[in-house]
């Protein structure tokens, strides 16, 4: 088998949360391009349907759309039942959906904290807990958690986000250990700044936009396609001996 064949995902099924836009959309398409069937899920079923149709048209792979609010554990349980019942068992879970509520600690209220931590940390745990055992019993699986450079460095005004993303990398390591030796790897992708909806505020502020570029050794923001290779690598057999790690896709930010 050539090394390129080890990146192929024919016969695998992926679930990508937040797969209708931003980094999740790019990763969903990348997984389908190398052969996976892909289910995308978010709160906006219409967007998920449109993304699933476009990806299916572009790649010829079966794609499906599901609605879920990851802040609600009963909806997560329903999503798992719907995906595994209607689409099929999940081999690759990409915990991509995430949000950021910014503000100094004294202005962040408890509800904001809960929303960010529940979406970015608790939901990935609940999904991995629901889908990981099936992967283990089938002897093959991939969990990919979207951390951030803010999993390991901090910015003021990002209390809930930084806490959730640092926690997610910790959870990645724990699950990697628990499922090691059962064919299931658990890794994180930690992006630097990418021009997505999440960063709309920063992108529309020329001063802050430039201030971010000055922190990136490569001197530019990430392009959506910059995330695709990392996702395919960690989803495939090419990364079979890689588990519990975090792959930084950040133009060198955290190398400093
Ligand atoms: N962009 C960056 O610079 C950057 C940097 C580091 C890490 N990351 C991480 O990468 C991931 C993707 O970021 P992005 O920039 O692509 O974000 P984005 O463009 O803002 O998209 C976020 C996605 O998450 C979904 N989502 C949010 N809350 C949800 C909920 N309660 N239930 C279900 N789905 C929900 C959204 O769909 P709906 O609104 O339709 O629900 C959307 O599809 C996130 O985890 C983020 O923290 C991003």
Image: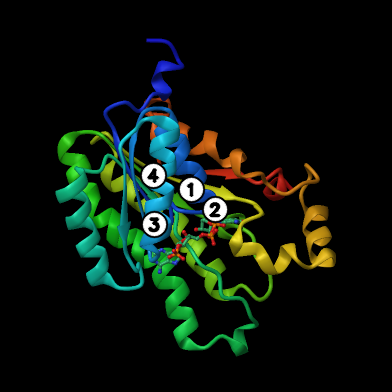
Task: Please indicate whether residue 157 sits to the left or right of residue 91 in the image.
Answer: right
Label 1 vs label 4: CA separation? 12 Å
Q: Which residue is mark 2?
A: 22
Task: Please indicate whether residue 64 sits to the left or right of residue 22 in the image.
Answer: left
Task: First in sequence, mark 1 or 4: give its number.
Answer: 1
Give the foreground label among 1 and 4.
4
Label 1 vs label 3: CA separation? 24 Å
Relative depth, front residue between 50 and 35: 50
Mark number, residue 171: 3
Q: Secondary structure at mark 4?
A: helix
Give the foreground label among 4 and 2.
4
Can you give x and y, in whole percent of width and height, for residue 189 in the image?
51, 46
Q: Which residue is mark 4?
A: 53
Label 3 vs label 4: CA separation? 33 Å
Q: Which residue is mark 1?
A: 25
Name the residue at 53% across, 37% down.
Answer: 228
Relative depth, front residue between 82 and 61: 61
Label 4 vs label 2: CA separation? 16 Å
Task: Count the numbered circles shown.
Answer: 4
């Amino acid at each position: 088998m050539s090394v390129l064949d080890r990146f192929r995902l024919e016969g695998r099924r992926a679930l990508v949360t937040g797969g209708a836009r931003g980094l999740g959309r790019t990763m969903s398409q990348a997984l389908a391009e190398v052969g996976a069937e892909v289910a995308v899920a978010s709160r906006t079923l219409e967007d998920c349907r449109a993304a699933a149709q476009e990806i299916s048209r572009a790649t010829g792979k079966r794609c499906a759309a599901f609605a879920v609010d990851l802040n609600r554990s009963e909806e997560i349980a329903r999503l798992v039942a719907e995906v595994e019942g209607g689409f099929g068992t999940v081999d690759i879970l990409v915990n991509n959906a995430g949000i950021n509520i910014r503000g100094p600690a004294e202005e962040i209220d408890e509800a904001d904290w809960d929303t960010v931590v529940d979406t970015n940390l608790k939901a990935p745990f609940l999904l991995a807990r629901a889908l990981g055992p099936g992967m283990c019993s089938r002897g093959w699986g991939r969990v990919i958690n979207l951390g951030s450079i803010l999993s390991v460095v901090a910015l003021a005004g990002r209390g809930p986000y930084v806490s959730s993303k640092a926690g997610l990398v910790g959870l990645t390591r724990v699950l990697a250990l628990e499922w090691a030796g059962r064919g299931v790897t658990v890794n994180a992708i930690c992006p630097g700044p990418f021009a997505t909806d999440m960063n709309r505020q920063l992108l529309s502020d020329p001063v802050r936009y430039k201030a971010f570029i000055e922190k990136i050794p490569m001197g530019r923001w990430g392009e959506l396609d910059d995330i695709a290779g990392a996702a395919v690598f960690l989803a495939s057999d090419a990364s079979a001996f890689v588990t519990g790690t975090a792959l930084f896709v950040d133009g060198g930010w955290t190398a400093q």
